[in-house]
Image: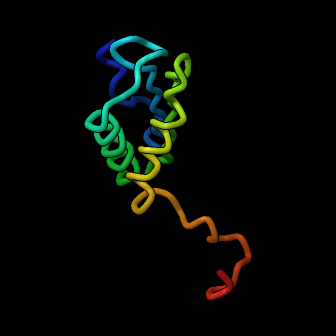
């Protein structure tokens, strides 16, 4: 459904769910598609939304790899440091 390509509703949350294309639940996404998803998530975050991305192309095992690829792309702009708020003092790495 083309209208489902953009988040709608409450602007404080952007929820993306990708099912695989062209074959839903089976297809692996190419690098261009994954980069586009990362940009969509970054754009939503730039407007202050909490951003969630779910890959549901699990039937052939592609979801984890696709999710990790996008996570790597957006790690510097969207994801907080894993040490933030964990009680680790600076320099205690």
In the figure, residue 30 lies in which quadrant? top left
Q: Residue at x 51, y 30 (%)?
A: 63
Please say if 82 is above or below 18: below
Asked if residue 78 lies left or right of residue 38, the reply is right
Is 83 on the left or on the right of 62, as rendered? Answer: right
Location of residue 76 by image quarter: bottom left
Residue 28 x/y as whole percent: 40, 25
Q: Quadrant where the N terminus lies?
A: top left
Q: Residue furthest left?
A: 32
Residue 61, horizontal then vertical, whole percent = 54, 25
Judging depth in this view, the residue of 3 and 89 nearest the camera is 89
Q: How is the image coloured?
A: rainbow
Q: Is residue 16 left or right of residue 46?
A: right
Residue 33, position as x, y percentages in the image: 30, 33
Write the residue at 44% across / 52% down. Answer: 72
Residue 46: name its quadrant: bottom left
Percent x, y for residue 40?
33, 41
User: In which quadrant will I find the C terminus?
Assistant: bottom right
Residues 11 and 45: in front is 45
């Amino acid at each position: 459904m083309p209208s489902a390509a953009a988040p709608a509703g409450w602007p404080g949350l952007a929820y993306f769910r990708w099912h695989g294309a062209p074959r839903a639940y089976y297809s692996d996404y190419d690098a261009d598609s994954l980069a586009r998803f990362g940009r969509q998530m970054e754009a939503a975050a730039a407007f202050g939304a909490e951003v969630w991305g779910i890959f549901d192309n699990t039937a052939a095992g592609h979801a984890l790899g696709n999710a990790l690829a996008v996570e790597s792309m957006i790690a510097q702009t969207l994801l907080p440091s894993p040490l933030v708020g964990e009680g680790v003092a600076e320099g205690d790495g």
